[in-house]
Amino acid sequence: MDREESVLKIFPSRIRQALEQTELNMENLQEIRVRVGQPLLCVYRGREFFLAGNGKLEEQEKNPVTVSGEELLETVSYVSRYSLYAFDEELRQGYITIPGGHRVGIAGKIVMEGEKIRSVRYISFLNVRLSHEKKGCADRVFPYLVKNGRFCHTLIISPPRCGKTTLLRDIIRQASNGNDLLAGQNVGVVDERSEIGGSYRGVPQNDLGIRTDVLDCCPKAEGMMMLVRSMAPDIVAVDEIGDYRDSRAIETVFHCGCRLLATVHGSSMEDILKKPLLQRLVQYRCFERYIVLDQEKEAGHVRDIFDERGTRLYV
């Protein structure tokens, strides 16, 4: 059983059997949404489907598998291995990472302690996000990311569910291992939501290369500063920048000789110019390469690659 199929083991028998009957290509299954008293929904190849009792994926609500409270609690028990207390820190972040690097988002009643989240109780909603490795998916873009033997400061621009983290992961792997275009680089990864490395008990479940160091569950701003100070990275990689708290750390990366590899939500260069922090970085030509993704043909489809001047490089 491969790592994608192993995620089915976290579900109670009725739900698991329905999912197994679909004969899905698990590499194209992105999310499984579980809500008490509501139909179970699957995001498959970027589209949302209802899971029917006979195992079929339906675009309309036809005899859907409706999740009971007992089934959701059973799923939570499987996910936490019957000990939610062991995952207190992750629960405060709203998710649990399971073997294979898959992330289970959790929602319910939030218990506060002052201004901080203490825990989540009465869990009633789950979002199982499958972690996929697509080794080689960066092959077509990598030649654009190296100039005079150096990795370019690179920003991946992508709407949700368009494969930005999958592409980011493979760029990290190739830069870390080295290839015909670039000697192997020390890569420091700040993995705030455990999505890049999919770490389980501190060990990345995804292949990020032989020269990669990971700060798991660490805020981006603090993590970037920590890596620069302590791990001497050639490249610092982060997912979803754009917060003002990231600003100082990003400037530190740029000015200390490290290269920055990052992603941001957006559908075009025009989109990111609406964000004050990124607008300034673009105007000062901090990034040397911009990769724009969409879902025109498939998740992860590369629409454009631009240089720091806005010149289109990709045909």
Image (cartoon, rainbow, N blue to C red):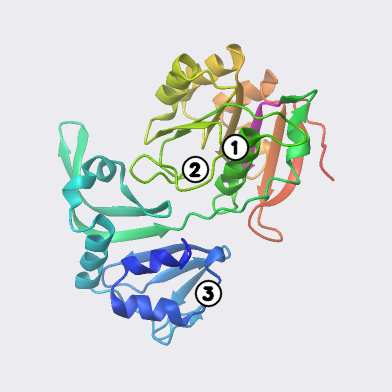
> Can I make out residue 266 in this image?
no
- Residue at label 2? 196
Q: How packed is label 2: few (under 14 Cα within 10 Å), some, or many (20 or more)?
A: many
Residue 50: quarter of image: bottom left
Which badge, 2 or 1, comes first in the chain's sequence?
Answer: 1
Q: How packed is label 3: few (under 14 Cα within 10 Å), some, or many (20 or more)?
A: some
| Above/below status of 112 relative to 78 | above
The residue lying at 73 percent from left, 39 percent from top is 142
- Residue at label 3? 24
x then y, percent, for residue 219: 39, 30
* Type of amino acid at the residue the image marks with label 2: Ile
Segment colored magenta: 151-157
Query: Would you say the residues marked 2 and 1 are in contact, meaning their CB atoms lie under 8 Å apart?
Result: yes
| Above/below status of 277 relative to 7 | above
- Residue at label 1? 172
The residue lying at 58 percent from left, 48 percent from top is 166
Residue 36: quarter of image: bottom left
x then y, percent, for residue 200: 36, 46
Query: Would you say the residues marked 2 and 3 are in contact, meaning their CB atoms lie under 8 Å apart?
Result: no
* Type of amino acid at the residue the image marks with label 1: Ile
- Whole-angstrom CA distance, mark 2 to mark 3, is 24 Å
- Whole-angstrom CA distance, mark 1 to mark 3, is 29 Å
Of residues 100 and 305, the one drawn nearer to the viewer in this rendering: 100
